[in-house]
Image (cartoon, rainbow, N blue to C red):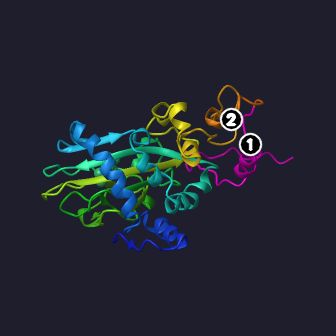
Amino acid sequence: MALKRVAADTSIDDLEAIVRQDGCVVIENLADDLVAKAKSGLDAWIDASPYGPGNFAGQHAKNVEGLVGKSGAAHALMIHETVLALCDRILLPNCVRYQLNYTGIMHLEPGNEAQELHRDGGIYPLRHPHPPTIMATMWAGSDFTAENGGTRLVPGSHLWEHERKARDDEVVSAVMPAGSLLVYIGGVIHGGGANTGNAKRTGIAIQYSLGWLRQEENLHLAVPPDLARTLPDRLARLVGYDFGGPFLGFVNGDDPHRLVEETALGERCHSRPELDAASKDLTLFQWGDIEPVPTPKS
Ligand SMILES: O=C(O)CCC(=O)C(=O)O
């Protein structure tokens, strides 16, 4: 299956349809200026970071996490309206709030070997396939090519049974110009490509997950309240200054958002009416291998 590449003005309905069917999509030149600004501010962090370690990160690869505190320019990417509209479609059926899951640079230099193929959703011990837990985005800070390590993906693998492995002819490379966006959900098999060329490949990876899951990056500790108070409110909520659902994530018995508000702590508050209402419409995760005890007839 090919990786679809669509224009920046593609409708949200069409994007959702592609992501549901293929698990991934490239949106070309979605935010050239924003990405260039974020990338130039992050170059110094890349230069100062060590390579690796190990095979997963790569001997000629650098990962720099904690981007909320490192790049004000990257905040605009974290709350980009197209991305959040797609999160609404992909994640909200299974949660009443989604959250940031990971923020990091994935930078591959010439000579770096291909990363092991994996599913990002594999951090949770769930048998595959299951509803999306994660929606990952990779902003192209440089051009992505098949030679410089453009992310390799297996479109459609988000619907495969758990044990199935990808054949070489099922793996495709994300080729996209700088400023473009690769979106893939957590069930898609993928990995960084080998950089066999001469150019560095820089991706800005920003991931979102269901609000009732533990975040991969510990954003609550990475973004203390003093920093959170300086963020756009939408971003502070995505970091975790919000409920993850009814009765999920209160602080001292109160709404976590109050930590970034000017007001003093209010009444005890473990949920909000809009969360309670939305939670009634959720599609429940289903365990296929446990036979429920039949309900007795009264
Ligand atoms: O660098 C890439 O293209 C993907 C990296 C990745 O999937 C990971 O580090 O988990």
Q: For residue 257, what is the image quadrant?
A: top right
Disc 2 to disc 1: CB gap under 8 Å: yes
Residue 272 - label: 1
The magenta-colored residue range is 269-298
Q: Mark 2, residues whose alpha carbon is within 10 Å: few (<14), some, or many (≥20)?
A: many
Q: Amino acid at mark 1?
A: Arg
The residue under label 2 is 255
235 over 262 or under it: above or below: below
Q: Nearer the viewer, residue 63 or 163?
A: 63
Distance Cα–Cα, label 2 vs label 1: 9 Å
- Quadrant housing the N terminus: bottom left
Q: Residue furthest right?
A: 298
Q: Is 275 one of the magenta-colored residues?
A: yes
Q: Nearer the viewer, residue 238 or 230?
A: 230
Q: Give the image location of residue 76, x and y in percent.
A: 47, 53
> Is residue 114 left or right of 282 when viewed as pictured?
left
User: For disc 2, does the CB lie below 8 Å from ligand 1?
Assistant: no
* Residue 71: image location, x then y, percent: 39, 44
Picture residue at 47% right of the left edge, 74% below the top: 9
Prevalent SS, magenta region: loop
Sequence-wise first label, 2 or 1: 2
